[in-house]
Amino acid sequence: MPKSKVSIYSSYQKLTEGIIHRSRSILIGLADFSMFFIRYFKELIRPPYEINEFVKQSYLIGNQSLALVGITGFIMGLVLTIQTRPTLAEFGAESWLPAMISVSIVREIGPVITALICAGKVGSGIGAELASMRVTEQIDAMEVSGSNPFKFIVVSRTTAAMLMLPLLTIYSDAISMFGSFVGVNIKGDVNFRLFFSQAFAQLSFTDLIPALIKTTLFGLVIGLISCYKGYYSDKGTEGVGQAANASVVISSLLIFIIDILAVQVSNFIID
Amino acid sequence: MQKEKITKPEISIQNLSIAFGPKKVLIDLNLEINKGENLVILGKSGCGKSVIIKCIIGLLVPDKGIIEVFGENILASSTEELNNFRKRIGFLFQSGALYDSMNVKQNLLFPLRMNKEIELNEKEKLVKEVLEKVGLSEAINKMPTELSGGMRKRLGLARSLMLKPEIMLYDEPTTGLDPITAKEISNLILEIQKDQGTSSIIITHDMNCAKITGNRIVILEQGKVSTEGSYKDLEQSKKEEVKGFFE
Ligand SMILES: Nc1ncnc2c1ncn2[C@@H]1O[C@H](COP(=O)(O)OP(=O)(O)OP(=O)(O)O)[C@@H](O)[C@H]1O
Ligand SMILES: [Mg+2]
C-alpha cells in the first residue's frame, strides 16, 4: 500500500475509534444517570425521611437565590414593558400592555429566567459542594457510619429544589409585574389598581398551572443533575470545578429542552 | 468445640485481591484479627493499607476473596445487613473526613441521628464523654474549619467512637500530631481496647504508636503480608525491609 493511503486509513481508524469510544461513554453515562434517577424516586418514598435536612436545604436554596431572582425579575418586567410599548402604541393597543406582559411573564419568561438563574446559582453550588464532600471522603464517612448518604444528601437537595423553584418563580413573576408597573409609569401615569386588574384579566389557571408544573420539572432537573455530577465526581480537587461547571451547563440545556416539550404538551392539552 | 468458638477470629480475610486498572494492589492477601487484639499494619506509602480496611468496611469491593466479620461474609450481605455491620465498626479516616457543614457536636451526633432508642440528653452526655476522652471539650460548638490539624484528627477519632464499636479501624491515627499528643492518642487506643474489649486494626508509620498499641504487627509488601510478629520480634529481625522501619 502506498504511504499516504496507509496514513489516511489509520486516521480514519482513529476517528472511528474516537467516535465509538465517545458514544460508548455517553451511553454509559446515560445508563448511570437513569439508575440515579430511579434510585432517587425509590429513596424518596421509602422511610425514614430526612425532614430536617429537607427544610434546611429548602431554606438555603430560597435564601441563596431570593435577591438575584428578585432583581432579574424586576429588570425583566421593566425592560419588557419599555421595549414593547412603542410597538403596541403604533397599533393603538397600549391598553393591552399589562395583559400581554403578564401572560408572557407568567407563561414563559418568569419560569425560564428563574430556572436559569437557579441552575447557575444553586446548581453550581450543589455540584461543587457534593464533589468536595466526595473528595474529602465525607460521603464515605456517612456510609461507614451506617447512614444513607444518598437520602441525606441527594434526596433532600433535589426535593428541596423541586419545591423551591415554583415558589421562586411565583415570587419572580410578582416582582416582574411590579417592574412592569414601574415601566408603564415612566411615561404616563397609570393607576396601580387599573394596571393590575388589566394584567390579571387575561390570566387564567391554564397559564399558571402548566407554568408551575414546568418549574417543578426544572427544579428536579437542576437538583438531580447537579447532585449526580457532584456525587459521582472522582477527579480530586479538579473534579470540584468540573462538577460545578457541568451541573450548570447540562441543567441549563435541559431546561430549554423541557421548555420546548412543555409548550407542545400544554398546547396539545389546552386545545 | 467450645474452645473453637472462642478463638474464632473477629475479622478473617482470605485470598483478598484487588486491582485498580492494571495496577494490582492486593494479591491473595490473608489476614486474621482475633477478638480483643490490636493489630498494627506497617507498609510503604501506597502499598494498599488503606485499601484493606476500606474493603473490610465495604467501601471498596475486592475482585476476589472472602472477608468475614463477626463470622459472616460481608461481601455476600445485603445493604441492610452491611449497614448493621457498619454500626458495630468504627472507622477513622486518614483524612479525618469531617462534615464541613456541621459543627463539632453535630459531627458527633451524626452517626446516632437515626437511632430513636437513645434519648437526646443521653446522646448529648455521650458527646461530652467522648470529647473529654480526646481532649476537645472546649471545641464543642466550633466548626471543623476552625480546628487545627491535630484537633481534626482527634474529632475524627471521637466520631468513630460514638457508636461504641466492637471493631475499630484506625487509618494513621497519629500522623500529623506532635509527639506528645501522638503518645496520648496511642494511649487512648490502648485504653479503648482495655475498656471496651475492642478489636482493632491500626495503620501507622509511627513506630512509637506501633510499640504502644500493637499486640501483633504485620508488614505489607507487594500486596501480601511479608512479615509478622510482635514489636520485639520485628525489632530484632535481620531482614532489610523490616529494619527500615525501626531505624
Ligand atoms: N479508589 C481508588 N481508585 C484507584 N486507585 C486507588 C483507589 N484507592 C487506592 N488506589 C490505589 O491503591 C494503591 C494503595 O492505596 P492506599 O491508599 O491503600 O495506600 P496506603 O498504603 O494507605 O498509603 P499511605 O500510607 O500513603 O496512606 C495506591 O497506588 C492508590 O493509587
Ligand atoms: Mg493510607
Image (spheres, rainbow, N blue to C red):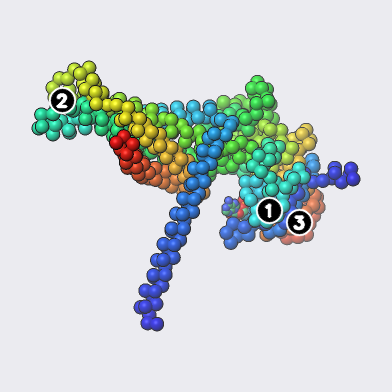
| Residue situated in front as seen by the camera: A263 or A88 | A263
Horizontal arrangement in the rendering, residue A255 relative to residue B139 (left or right)? left
Q: Position of residue A127 (x, y in %)?
A: 45, 41
Q: Residue at x 89, y 43 (%)?
A: B2
Q: Residue furthest bottom?
A: A1
Helix or strand or loop: what does disc 3 sit on? Answer: strand
- Kindly identify the amino acid type of the residue bearing the numbered disc 3: Thr
Q: Residue at x 39, y 45 (%)?
A: A250
Mark-to-mark CA distance, 2 and 1: 82 Å
Q: Dot 3: few (<14), some (14–19), or many (≥20) neighbours within 10 Å?
A: some
- Kindly identify the amino acid type of the residue bearing the numbered disc 2: Ser
Q: Circle 2 is placed at which residue position?
A: A95
Label number found at residue B227: 3
Label number found at residue A194: none
Label number found at residue B43: 1
Mark-to-mark CA distance, 2 and 3: 91 Å
Q: Quadrant of the C terminus of chain A?
A: top left
Chain ID of residue with mark 1: B
Q: Residue at x 76, y 49 (%)?
A: B12
Q: Dot 1: few (<14), some (14–19), or many (≥20) neighbours within 10 Å?
A: many
